[in-house]
Amino acid sequence: MSDDKNKKITPETDIQKVVNHYFYTRGLSLDQIKESARKKKIIYGRYTRAAKEILDLAGSAEKARQAITRVAEWAKSRNLEYSLETVAKKWLELDRLKPKEVIKKPFYGKMPLIWSNTKGKWYAINDDGEWLEFVGKEEEIEWRVVD
């Protein structure tokens, strides 16, 4: 008999579910997590205390995963680092954590466009700060994300 048939499949504990979900939010697959742990790139035990704390706060692995996802989305939208400890620290603020809103602004070439409600027209602002009436077509307006 091969060793594979003798291996018992043990169910994932709640702490493992929480730690693994944290790594999933960081873009790692289960195979990558296992490989990193085997190569000691990830010291799995370092994450268990924070995972237990989050489980205690959440009451279930599912609610803990939801909290991790919320913190991950919030942090990523602001280019912030986050950890399981961040989730525990932000626990009382979870319902107020929202991903940063992505705002797109209109441009024509390099010039930003401004809509004038009084004139009902678009204006392009050149490098000298002059407002030039935009006479192009709506399809020519490029919407860009601006930080």
Image (cartoon, grey):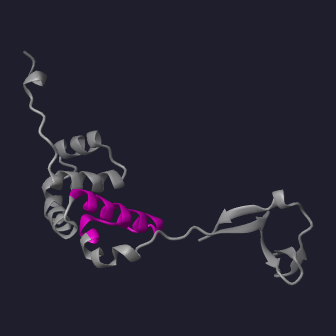
Give residue 2's quadrant in the image.
top left
Residue 79 belongs to magenta span: yes
Give the tally of numbered discs: 0
Identified at 18% across, 64% down, the residue is 55
Q: Is residue 116 left or right of residue 53?
A: right
Q: Looking at the figure, which quarter contains the N terminus?
A: top left
Give residue 79's quadrant in the image.
bottom left
The relative height of residue 80 versus residue 21 in the rendered view (above or below) is below
| Residue range (magenta) | 61-87
Give residue 126's quadrant in the image.
bottom right
Residue 3 belongs to magenta span: no
Q: Is residue 114 left or right of residue 76?
A: right
Residue 131 locus on image (x, y percent): 86, 80
Identified at 28% across, 74% down, the residue is 91
| Magenta span dominant secondary structure | helix
Residue 50 locus on image (x, y percent): 18, 65
Residue 83 locus on image (x, y percent): 28, 65
Q: Which residue occupies the foreground of this view, 96 or 136?
A: 96
